[in-house]
Image (tube, rainbow, N blue to C red):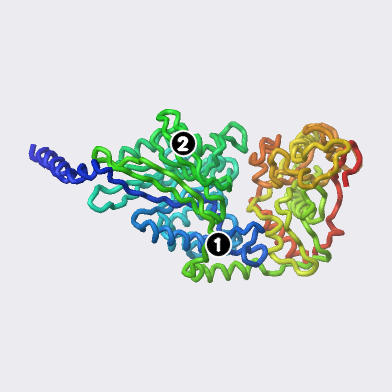
Amino acid sequence: MHSKKIAVLGMAGLTALAIPSVAHASAGKSVTVTVMGTSDLHGNTLNWDYFKNAEFDDGKGNDVGLAKVSTMVDKIRAERGADHTLLFDSGDTIQGTPLAYYYAKVEPITQTGELHPMARAMNAIGYDAVTLGNHEFNYGLPLLATWIKQMKAPVLGANAVDATTGKPAYQPFVIKTMKVKGEKPIRVGVLGLTNPGVAIWDKGNVEGKLRFDDLVKTAGKWVPVIRGLGADVVVVTAHAGDNGLSSYGGDLPVENAAAMVGEQVPGVDAVLFGHAHNEVPQRFVTNKVTGEQILLTEPAKWGQRLSVLDFTLTKKNGKWAVTGKSSATLNTNAVAEDPKIVALMKKQHDATVGYVNKEVATSKDELLAAESPYKDTPILDYIQKVQTETVKKAIAGTADADLPVLSIAAPFSRTATFPAGPVSIRDMAGLYIYDNTLMAVRLTGAQLKDYLEHSAKYFAQLAPDAPVDLSRLTNAGNIPDYNYDQLSGVGYDVDVAKPAGQRITGLSYNGQPVSADQRFVVAVNNYRQSGGGGFPHVSTAPVVYNAQVEIRQALIDYATETKIIDSADFAEVNWKLTRDGKPLF
């Protein structure tokens, strides 16, 4: 009875305290809360291109890195009042530059105890919450766990759950409280959602350990919880594009579900999203349940933009309600790098620069990747050679040892170069820009043909007398360069006069036509084998090799061992583009 009296008194006390607020409410007291957002930072702390060993320059005037972001964040905190601003990130943080690679693989933070460069910079800037992206899982769960521990901000991922128990494996959400003078505080809830594709793309690291649930269902579960805990504003930070499509089959939940969350889950005010590397200053979708307008924004990539979301909150019946919202993206090229962040990163930056500029071999000729999307080039043949040799060595003495070994590679970078003379780790990493590992699968001749037909969709169909316009020949249907696979070890033509699906002609091995049931071992990367790009057969084919060898490292090791890069040893034109059977070039 006594405790009940206290409870009643407590309520009475709260009511008494709330009276002045009600008076303000009639005057329509409004407060603006600002949420700043980054996404897809991909290991960029400074405005530096490690592959070019120079300040970053993409020819469009964009800058990159957290040092630029820091200056802009400070500016907004000064303008709006630091106590009314928050800073979130939507994932893909710890992978993507030689700096990130160095502290994951060369001097791993899991062994040295060193602070991860992204943790060092983000902690200094003062992030309020960070969401897991799919690339967070690239280096395995122990490294991810170490980085999370080093972060001062909570790292969120509500839909990454324990594969056995189904319980959240990471913190699902956080509620930040902002004081308002003479008023009850404003509570901002942020729910973090990551990408279901992790189950495919990093299968080797997460299989049997983590499950990645549907973004919409997960938001539907947690948003009411966040609202129930008194959140006045709810922001979802999602590592997912906004087009409702997936780059993989239908076995997993939708990959790019950011807009779907806004449309289908009541109680969400805004979605700060990433993954697609697009710039979306402001977009509204209508929630199908409540009819409310939900704000969406995406801040491009690498720290090139900062999304700024403004929420107007007005007192209604003693409660804060969102009465207005808008967003914009700010270009970080408008500000200088924060000298505090530059100084903080110097030691780790210098260590990375020293590493990437180490010479590993000498090239007899200059080898360029510029034409590799439409011609068989020696520089891509170098990747094929290393992959083929690595797999051949590995399967010696196994049941597959007598099968021909083929290899698949895609033109990841049109700007990659091996200079004539010394070749550095930087040159190798510039050619192979992803942290993929090498695998090998067994495919039949019929499956190879299907695979190559899928790849050849990359080309636009050319009319018999149309001029060859290189700017329109490739990337048909917005297929990126990295999804155009070239096969070495067999001969074939790609006839671009034919419709997609009927383009591969003259598929042969050792001068003989490939038969439908002929068997081959094919070297592929883990992204492709796990279903990335939706190529047929490769994800269900028997795996004959998977030693988790990083392809970039294999290239570096091979060059270090052979010392000489001589195109005469590996260059072989085994495929070409044709039009009605005649060579295009």
Task: From this view, report whether residue 563 is shown above or below residue 406.
Answer: below
> Does residue 211 show up?
no
- At 47% from the left edge and 53% from the top edge, which residue is drawn? 145
Image-based side of 122 in relation to 226, left or right? right
Residue 205 or 15: which is nearer the viewer?
15
Residue 218 or 334: which is nearer the viewer?
334
Q: Quadrant of residue 356?
A: bottom right
Residue 510, position as x, y percentages in the image: 89, 43
Which-is-in-front pick, marks 1 and 2?
Answer: 2
Q: Residue furthest top?
A: 289
Residue topped by disc 2: 262
Where does the N terminus fall, quadrant-wise? top left
**Element carrying mark 2:** helix
Q: Quadrant of residue 441?
A: top right
Give the CA separation, mark 1 to mark 2.
37 Å
Disc marking residue 103: 1
Q: Are marks 1 and 2 in contact (CB under 8 Å)?
A: no
| Earlier sequence position, callout 1 versus callout 2 | 1
Residue 317 or 262: which is nearer the viewer?
317
Residue 424 or 50: which is nearer the viewer?
50
Residue neighbourhood size for the residue with mark 2, other residues' Cα within 10 Å, grouped as few (<14), some (14–19), many (≥20): many
Q: Quadrant of residue 74?
A: bottom left
Residue 226, position as x, y percentages in the image: 35, 40
Image-based side of 388 in relation to 176, left or right? right
**Element carrying mark 1:** helix
Amino acid found under the numbered disc labelled 1: Tyr
- At 25% from the left edge and 43% from the top edge, which residue is drawn? 27
Residue 19, position as x, y percentages in the image: 17, 43
Task: From this view, report whether residue 290 is shown above or below residue 192.
Answer: above
Image-based side of 468 in relation to 45, left or right? right
Amino acid found under the numbered disc labelled 2: Gly
